[in-house]
Amino acid sequence: MNTKKIGIYGLGRFGLFWADLLSQDFEVIGYNRTERDFRGITLGSREEVLSCNALFFCVSISSMKEVLQQCATHIGRDTVVFDTCSVKCYPAGLMQEMLPPETQIIATHPMFGPDSGRNGVAGLPLVFSPLQADEQTQGFWRDYFLSIGLDVLEMTPEEHDREAAVTQGITHVIGRVLGGLDLGPSRIGTLGYRKILEVVEQTCNDPYQLFMDLQHYNPYTHSMRLRLKESLEEVMRALEEADSAL
Amino acid sequence: MNTKKIGIYGLGRFGLFWADLLSQDFEVIGYNRTERDFRGITLGSREEVLSCNALFFCVSISSMKEVLQQCATHIGRDTVVFDTCSVKCYPAGLMQEMLPPETQIIATHPMFGPDSGRNGVAGLPLVFSPLQADEQTQGFWRDYFLSIGLDVLEMTPEEHDREAAVTQGITHVIGRVLGGLDLGPSRIGTLGYRKILEVVEQTCNDPYQLFMDLQHYNPYTHSMRLRLKESLEEVMRALEEADSAL
């Protein structure tokens, strides 16, 4: 067991999962704004959690600003602060702006959750963006994540968001658009159609708020959506032309 | 070996595959408008092929009308005529209109091809729509398709096209729309994104003409596309509102 103590701020679906995972190697305490059953996670006061050796914010993207406003002055002087949001530029900017300049900060995006990590996290990707962290701190955490089998992808928040606007962004927009059509299994469903249904199921299982946040707080999704719309219109136009030509 | 002789009219990618498959149980001869290497398929004259016991048209949807015009008067009196098009109302209507009223006609849609049937056709779906055929003829072919392991789905051309407009139609429109965006593999590609890439690859591998034909000759794709467009616009509108509210 490592001697570091880890605080998890926010015990939603992901926070609980993350707390479980890290408690295999660290002492972990959790804090949540509202109380309910947290399945055996040791709870601590807000102040205790904020002054652990490492603090992971597991809150929604859209609540990061308010949470940091409430927490910034209570975070321990030597506490290494992480976020775990699915966009990176926005929370990275907030943390750098709102936390004291000497605070060590590492932005992360663990690209998995209780569903995809159900049978272990080996091989799953974790985006790792040290913002303000010394070599030793970066090295410790990079090595730790590697040691539990994660595929640690070091990139800047900009690189992450630019790429995620396409990969995550398009997948979720397509999933939500098709989710609005009430598709269902079909006897004549091809393999491709079944993949489409899987995308719909997977994306529409996520909270709607996460979908909106992923789109709204990623600065690159807007242009992705415009390209998608243009491409759809182009395909539609070609088909309308063919229809009216005959 | 069955004593029936089968004619395959059109030796494109699917026609060759179909001829290969049927020649495991029947004597098969093929005809193609233009000559090239047909990989060991026995060729016959147009007249020979059109007067076999069973005749399968394996031509593009958009050429069915012209092909029937050229062939109708040469088809054998006892020849059972099948099409294999990926839409059903249009070729079914043409065959009923253009072939003699006593001709036995069964519309089919073998929902597979050389790729998906590479390792055998067992379990793959074949849509089966007897249009003008006596019980014995229907029974013979239904039993034969079942005997080689196909999942024989009996439905009317209307039922097929209505359902295919969604399953096949949406899959191909999404594939083509995303195909216009030059997506590629990504280090941070989620499982959902990889499924999206597979849909793009699969659909954009098919000839563009097949895509256009699937849409144009299925009477139900137009309203499917309108619903798709509306759903996209609704999602876009919700996102624009969220963007401008903050």
Image (spheres, coloured by chain):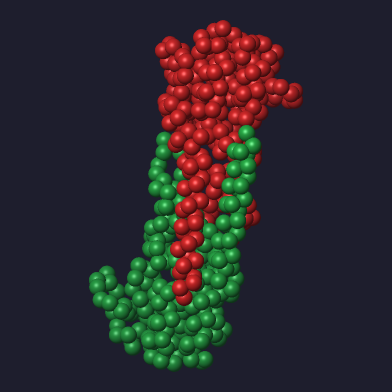
Chain colours: A red, B green
Q: Residue B40 in the image: x percent, y percent? A: 27, 72
Q: Residue A111 in the image: x percent, y percent? A: 51, 32
Q: Residue A23 in the image: x percent, y percent? A: 59, 19
Quarter of the image for residue A211 reads top right
- In the image, residue A55 sits, relative to residue B121, either above or below, namely above
Res. A21 in view: no
Quarter of the image for residue A56 reads top right
Numbered label tally: 0
- In the image, residue B214 sits, relative to residue B95, either above or below, namely above
- In the image, residue A100 sits, relative to residue B120, either above or below, namely above
Picture residue at 56% right of the left edge, 33% below the top? A217
Picture residue at 55% right of the left edge, 46% below the top? A173
Nearest the viewer among A98 and A83 is A98
- In the image, residue A229 sits, relative to residue B80, either above or below, namely above
Picture residue at 42% right of the left edge, 49% below the top? B181
Picture residue at 40% right of the left edge, 77% below the top? B63
Quadrant into which the N terminus of chain B falls: bottom left
The residue lying furthest to the top in this view is A77
* Image position of B100 (left or right of A180): left
Res. A196 in view: yes
Q: Residue B184 in the image: x percent, y percent? A: 39, 44
* Image position of B44 (left or right of A119): left
Quadrant into which the C terminus of chain B falls: top right
